[in-house]
Amino acid sequence: MCCRDMEVDRQPEEACTFDEDSLELGDVKDMRLEAEAVVNDVLFAVSEMHVSQNLGSASDVAYINVETREGNRYCLELTEAGLRVVGYVFDQVDEDLSTQYHETVYSLLDTLSPGYREAFGNALLQRLEMLKQNGQ
């Protein structure tokens, strides 16, 4: 496993951007660092994505703003339970919104954005083509 327990979809050969020890505070993950890693993983497949500077992050929760390729904006909450949509505007948490948790950012974006699915699929095909060329 790489350095993020929640993102089991990663390939073992992919390098981690953070040292595993830097993500752990005792037995509790620092969600701010986890959120930065999430953003770095999928930034190529969305229009905009960043960790919220206006909503308070802590060791147990962080907020991520994302704009899909379709132009839809979401505020995401990241906790040990996973990721979920908490608002439809950057830096906004709608307390009345009750949305499903997703174990990975890939799963969440797959449900929100056909453009994400297409970009992810294209990136995968390019990677496979590169591996094929290097193998010949």
Image (tube, rainbow, N blue to C red):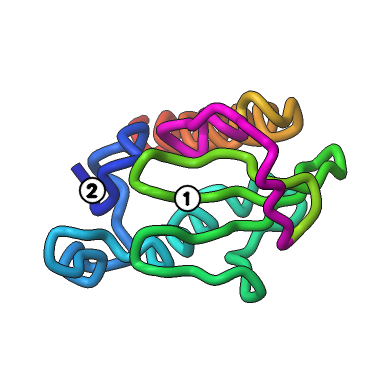
Q: CA distance from mark 1 to mark 2?
A: 19 Å
Rendered residue at 61%/54% (across/down): 43
Q: Earlier in the sequence, mark 1 or mark 2?
A: 2
Disc marking residue 78 = 1
Foreground of the two, 18 or 57: 57
Rendered residue at 58%/37% (across/down): 123
- Mark 2, residues whose alpha carbon is within 10 Å: few (<14), some, or many (≥20)? some
- Image quadrant for the N terminus? top left
Q: Determine whether label 1 and label 2 are within 8 Å by CB.
A: no
- Image quadrant for the C terminus? top left
Rendered residue at 56%/59% (across/down): 63
- Above or below residue 132? Residue 50 is below
| In-image side of 37 versus 94 (left or right) | left
Residue furthest to the right in view is 71
Foreground of the two, 95 or 125: 95
Count of numbered circles in the view: 2
In the image, residue 98 lies in the stretch drawn in magenta: yes
- Mark 1, residues whose alpha carbon is within 10 Å: few (<14), some, or many (≥20)? many
Measuring from the top left, give residue 97's x and y in whole percent. 68, 36
Disc marking residue 2 = 2
The magenta span reads: 91-109
Residue furthest to the left in view is 26
SS at badge 2: loop
Q: Amino acid at mark 1?
A: Leu
Measuring from the top left, give residue 8's x and y in whole percent. 31, 34
Measuring from the top left, give residue 78's x and y in whole percent. 47, 50
| In-image side of 108 versus 118 (left or right) | left
SS at badge 1: strand
Measuring from the top left, give residue 80's x and y in whole percent. 34, 46
Q: Amino acid at mark 2?
A: Cys
- Above or below residue 95? Residue 51 is below
